[in-house]
Image (cartoon, rainbow, N blue to C red):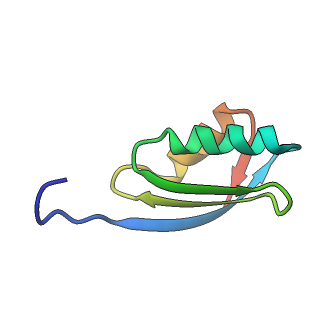
Amino acid sequence: MPIGGKITMLRGSYHVTGMGCGACVKHVKSAVTALSGVQKCDVDLESETMTVDFDEEVVSFEDIKEAVEEAGYGLSK
């Protein structure tokens, strides 16, 4: 990032479907954290939720959703 640059971080909370175990949680988290612009990702199996801190200038909700879907799960706002 250049000096004086602006980071536009967002925190999004989303509903994840299709997870059944701890391995699923790790798979989803791995898929999302591999995206450039994602700073942090927490996934909760019991509540089927995912919280993601990301730079909206680098990655979008649609990018995150695509990564989750390619991993074999569903994602909605």
Q: Is residue 72 above or below residue 1?
A: above
The location of residue 68, given as percent across then percent down, is: 65, 41
Marks counted in the figure total 0
Q: Report the side of 47 relative to 10 (left or right).
A: right
Q: Quadrant of the C terminus?
A: bottom right
Q: Nearer the viewer, residue 59 or 44?
A: 44
Quarter location, residue 70: top right
Q: Nearer the viewer, residue 16 or 77?
A: 16
The location of residue 62, given as percent across then percent down, is: 53, 48
Q: Is residue 34 above or below residue 6?
A: above
The location of residue 1, given as percent across then percent down, is: 19, 53
Q: Nearer the viewer, residue 77 or 30?
A: 30
The location of residue 61, given as percent across then percent down, is: 53, 54
Q: Is residue 20 above or below residue 48?
A: above
Q: Residue at x 39, y 58 (%)?
A: 55
**Can the viewer see residue 70 in this picture?**
yes
Q: Residue at x 83, y 63 (%)?
A: 47
